[in-house]
Amino acid sequence: MDFQLAIIGGGPAGYSAAEAAGKAGLSVVLFEKNALGGVCLNEGCIPTKTLLYSAKVFDGARNASKYAVKADNVSFDLAKIVSRRQKVVRKLVLGIKNKMSESGVTVVTGEAYIQDKNTIKCGDEVYKCEKLMLCTGSKTFVPPVKGLEKIDFWTHREALDCKELPESLVIIGGGVIGMEFASYFCSLGVKVTVVEMTSEILGGIDKEIASLLRAEYTKKGINFMLDAKVTEICNGESGKVTVKYQTADGEGCVESAKLLVSAGRHACTEGYGLENLSLEFTPQHRIMVDTKTMMTSIDGVYACGDITGFSMLAHTAVREAEVAVSHICGKDDNMSYKAIPGVVYTNPEVASVGMTEEMAKAVGFDYKVMKLPMAYAGRFVAENEGVNGICKVITTSNDTIIGAHILGNPASELIVIAGMMIERGKKLEDFKKFVFPHPTVGEIFREF
Ligand SMILES: Cc1cc2nc3c(=O)[nH]c(=O)nc-3n(C[C@H](O)[C@H](O)[C@H](O)COP(=O)(O)OP(=O)(O)OC[C@H]3O[C@@H](n4cnc5c(N)ncnc54)[C@H](O)[C@@H]3O)c2cc1C
């Protein structure tokens, strides 16, 4: 079978590329070995946010009296929370299937194997293609910690399926995924400890915002062990897990009923014939791509999404895929990594785009930092009784916006405003040139 474009992997990168290319009139074959939607729809973004929303509703109901609403004896049904998550996923995966058929994409269920850049084998069939796109994503990194192999630990997959809450949970890794699960289980009443090997949670996020979020969750009862490198894990007494760690002050240990390992993800580059392409890799072992077009070192072979290792985010994957298809179709469209938003869906949310203060300092920028409490936005005060937040904007010395960082709901929705300003090279005063609806939390940007 001959196609103009073959895509391996049906996650956000792969299905977005397939849809765009199909709509542009190309003949497209998309290979997916598990489920369309990839990690994002089936075990990542969507399921976690569905669970977190139930936890947020539960938190809201428990705190209803702050808003003069009586909601006594609030409880939750964990089995139903989990089955609602599965229902949401099924609905969205069906939506992707429909999009593929509407775009005329041939979807092949099975593991694709690359024989050469124009030949893909899947099962007994051989497919010929003019262009090839690699969208095979990433997988959980399990750190080589002594004793871990003997423990029945969770990764995000098992944590998503949890229908019986452990009394306590240790999470190795205080990154975005670790903190979202910490938030979820903490809301549901589990005693959570986060063990993080660096000096602050949420690596890559503005340090001040990350420490404020940590303070918020410390108040809610989460125990944080920072600068703590896990050295050994073993089965403790009465079915518990003991996590031993090393800090500058010496050795310590923490016991819990369950262990969740959330120590990062790495690109899927093995087991499907990638070596047959002789691609060039960066010194960080990433596939070398032209960051404007997403083409690899081999003409006609593209790589998009987590496999490139740039941001490990679904929205980056989608945009990279669109840019690659534009390049294949000869359209003028470039990838830009200047304003990729990152969100932590805790409660309160954290969102960040562009440079952090730490990055600006590291590259020697002459930068300015401006901060405002979120209470400057009337809507925030109306809807966040007794909760503080902060909005931080980083500019160059001539007021060009280069970064924005928010702690407070709904940071995930607000950050796009700052992202568009950064992408377009706008200045601080430009916020005031747009009319924002009133009252909205986004009006905070007009206060700078
Ligand atoms: C718990 C969790 C929460 C997350 N939350 C968010 C979030 O809130 N926001 C966000 O932006 N990102 C989030 N992410 C990250 C996000 O899921 C990824 O960035 C995104 O899925 C990457 O898309 P992708 O298309 O590159 O790869 P993937 O989604 O990993 O898809 C790759 C697909 O390729 C298939 N595949 C691999 N090899 C082959 C082969 N040889 N043949 C056929 N098929 C193959 C796989 O089965 C998979 O379906 C989260 C991730 C996790 C784990």
Image (cartoon, rainbow, N blue to C red):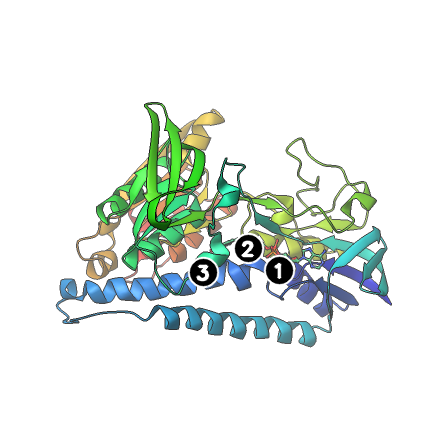
* C-alpha span from label 2 to label 1: 9 Å
Looking at this view, is 399 or 153 the one in front? 153
Which residue has dot 1 on it? 11
Answer with the quadrant where ligand 1 appears in the image: bottom right
Looking at this view, is 80 or 38 the one in front? 80
| Mark 1: secondary structure | loop
Which residue has dot 3 on it? 160
Above or below, 340 against 147 in this view is below
Residue found 18% across the figure and 66% down from its top: 64
Mark 3: few/some/many CA within 10 Å (<14, 14-19, 20+): some
Q: Which of marks 3 and 1 is in front?
A: 3
Q: Report the side of 134 relative to 257 (left or right).
A: right
Which residue has dot 2 on it? 314
| Mark 2: secondary structure | helix
Q: Is label 2's Cβ within 8 Å of ligand 1?
A: yes
Which mark identifies residue 44?
A: none
Residue 305 point in image, percent of width and height: 62, 51
Above or below, 83 against 447 in this view is below
Mark 1: few/some/many CA within 10 Å (<14, 14-19, 20+): many
Q: Report the side of 97 relative to 398 (left or right).
A: right
Q: Is label 1's Cβ within 8 Å of ligand 1?
A: yes
Residue found 68% across the figure and 58% down from its top: 9
